[in-house]
Image (cartoon, grey):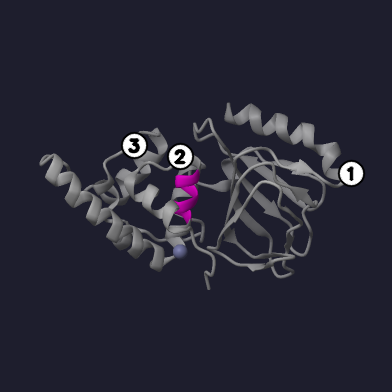
Amino acid sequence: MVSFHPDSKFLTDFAAGSLPLSEAVCVAAHLEFCGKCRAHVQQLSDVAAQMMVRLDPVVDDNDGFESLMQRIESSDPAPAGQVSNIAAKAAVSATGIPRVVEKLAGGSLQNLNWVKLGKSLRIAPMDIGCKSRQTAIYDIKAGRPMPEHEHRGEEITVLLKGSFSDADGKYVKGDFVVRYAGERHQPTATLDTDCICLVSLEQPVKASSWWYRLMEPFVQYRLSGFSR
Ligand SMILES: [Zn+2]
């Protein structure tokens, strides 16, 4: 069951169409797992749409989820009313991966350019045209730890498949986890299945283990190579 949700600022900015693209994709992915947040965004969108209609009577309030997908792909902010049908239509695809993520990956996560980092981890950068943040899919092998690392900026992780734990707790499919600059942790995938996460990074993480420090220039090169 989903336990960690975006706070109201994320949801309000998302409903208003003002959240930067990389974060908007994370919120959209969470919404596909979480009826509670979908209902919250629906309410916010309806209020915003009513305000927009008062300001401009030609606003189209009926475009729904497909238009949100187009907006996310084009990075083009849309009137808040265009996301108002999310609650009725959003749901993960048959593969269990959120549709917004599969769409941005060109239909399947297997289409992405995966970079293997040791035996535990592989990373696929996603070029979604967002300049301010790096967006990527992480795949952590079942039962294996990621290298311990410290964050230089905010990191959002949305669990798409499997689960992981760190010193603060256990996180499962659909959870929206935010880490801030200076926080240090070492996620470990649980034993039953590989853990696949959508990650949005404000700044590259600072390595705190010798292994990751060795790998860091390579990771940053690959990530920045795809996102800029
Ligand atoms: Zn939620």
Q: Which residue is mark 1?
A: 210
The kind of residue on which mark 1 rests is Trp
Image: 67 above or below 157: above
Q: Is residue 137 magenta?
A: no
**Residue 92 at least partly seen:** no
User: Image point 34% across, 50% down: which residue?
Assistant: 15
Q: Is residue 25 magenta?
A: yes
Q: Is residue 93 left or right of residue 83?
A: right
Residue found at the very far right of the displayed protein: 210
Residue 111 at x, y = what percent?
A: 57, 41
User: Image point 44% across, 65% down: which residue?
Assistant: 34
**Residue 133 at least partly seen:** yes
Contact (Cβ within 8 Å) of mark 3 with mark 2: no
Other-residue count near label 3 (Cα within 10 Å), few / some / many at <14 / 14–19 / ≥20: some
Q: Which residue is mark 3?
A: 77
Residue 88 at x, y = what percent?
A: 29, 62
> Magenta stretch?
23-29
Q: Nearer the viewer, residue 84 or 208?
A: 208
Q: Which residue is mark 2?
A: 21
Other-residue count near label 2 (Cα within 10 Å), few / some / many at <14 / 14–19 / ≥20: many
The main secondary structure of the magenta stretch is helix
